[in-house]
Amino acid sequence: MSTATMHEPVMLDEVIYSLACRRGGTYVDCTVGPGGHSEAVLREIGPEGLLIALDRDDHALQLARERLTNGGRIKLLRENFKNLPLVLNNLHVSEVDGILLDLGISSLQLMSPQRGFSFTIEGPLDMRMDTTQKLTAADLVEQLSEKELTEIFQKYGEERKARRIAQRIVQERVLEPIVTTGRLARIVESIYGFSRRRIHPATQIFQALRIVVNEELKSLKKFIRDATGFLRVGGRMVVLTFHSLEDRIVKTEFNLLSGKCVCFRPAEECICPRERLVRLLTRKPVRPTEEEVHRNPRSRSAKLRSVEKL
Ligand SMILES: C[S@@+](CC[C@H](N)C(=O)[O-])C[C@H]1O[C@@H](n2cnc3c(N)ncnc32)[C@H](O)[C@@H]1O
């Protein structure tokens, strides 16, 4: 198994089915990672198609380059997907047939000790997807006030014990800076003691820090609007999310773009644009099969939503 194939693409068949790739079409994979979904898209569009593939992580791009450059016409770029309009304008591409967004981190990022994403693997408390960026998770843990830490744990981790965990972090960092994944995980565990939980107690704290370090939710809403503008009529956008905060944004934006009301005010006070730009292909999110979850537990929280441009 090569390094790139250590990450199994989530809901691969469902993604390819939802994109309904056209031979010779132009597609954008906004989160190419090690290239699992892209490899299948290239197969579908054939040598006359074009795939534009972005990632903000240099290592992921390097793996994608090794895996994909012989597979067809591809442009691989180190870019944040929030810059999609700029990327497409620079390439003189005004319309595309499909756009894929597979949010979150890859198994390779998660399993790399030096990237600091995992609470089960000892490493520096880093969590940057783009390693040229300055801000790390250790900086947040060191510099934010108790109130700010509480707020981000509540808002981005939906953590019940946010205030107590923030308090303990502030007490502990005075004794010694918290610069490793293991130390932070142990601090969170000390608040939960031995209580039985379905997930590890540090899961939500690590999620909250990762979201803030990488500004994960900030540009998602704008991205969905911008990306829709580049879809040709009949073109499709497919988004895979891995937690409820992301899924809520995607669901709301797709509903708005399909002309639905999301403000829940009485009809005469509604402020939603009610303009139908897309057709919802998924009223409810598509979930991985039991067999996939069994084979690849990382897929268990995945939700797929898709739309078609009108
Ligand atoms: C779950 S992985 C993608 C895996 C890929 N679909 C595959 O099947 O091999 C998500 C990737 O998105 C990248 N990423 C996350 N946020 C990004 C952003 N705002 N702009 C560009 N890439 C981003 C991460 O660096 C990571 O490599």
Image: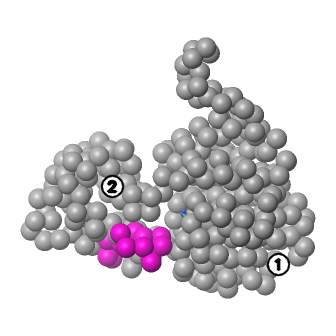
- SS for tag 2? helix
Instruction: Tell whether position 125 is magenta.
Output: yes
Q: Residue at x 62, y 15 (%)?
A: 267
Q: Which residues are magenta?
A: 122-135
Classed neighbour count for the residue bearing mark 1: other residues with Cα under 10 Å, few (<14), some (14–19), many (≥20): some
User: Is 244 above or below relative to 79?
Assistant: above
- SS for tag 1? loop
Please tell me in which quarter of the rendered image ligand 1 is found. Answer: bottom right
User: Is 126 above or below relative to 154?
Assistant: below
Ranked by sequence position, the earlier of labels 1 and 2 is 1
Give, as a three-letter code, the residue at label 2: Ile
Does 41 sit left or right of 112 as displayed?
right
Observer-nearest residue: 39 or 136?
A: 136
Give, as a three-letter code, the residue at label 1: Gly
Give the quadrant of residue 280: top right
Of badges 1 and 2, the one in the foreground is 1
Does 44 sit left or right of 58 as displayed?
right
Q: Is residue 138 visible?
A: yes
Query: Of the numbered discs in the image, which one, if any, rests on residue 72?
Result: 1
Q: Residue at x 67, y 73 (%)?
A: 35
Identify the residue under disc 2. 205
Residue farthest left in this picture: 175
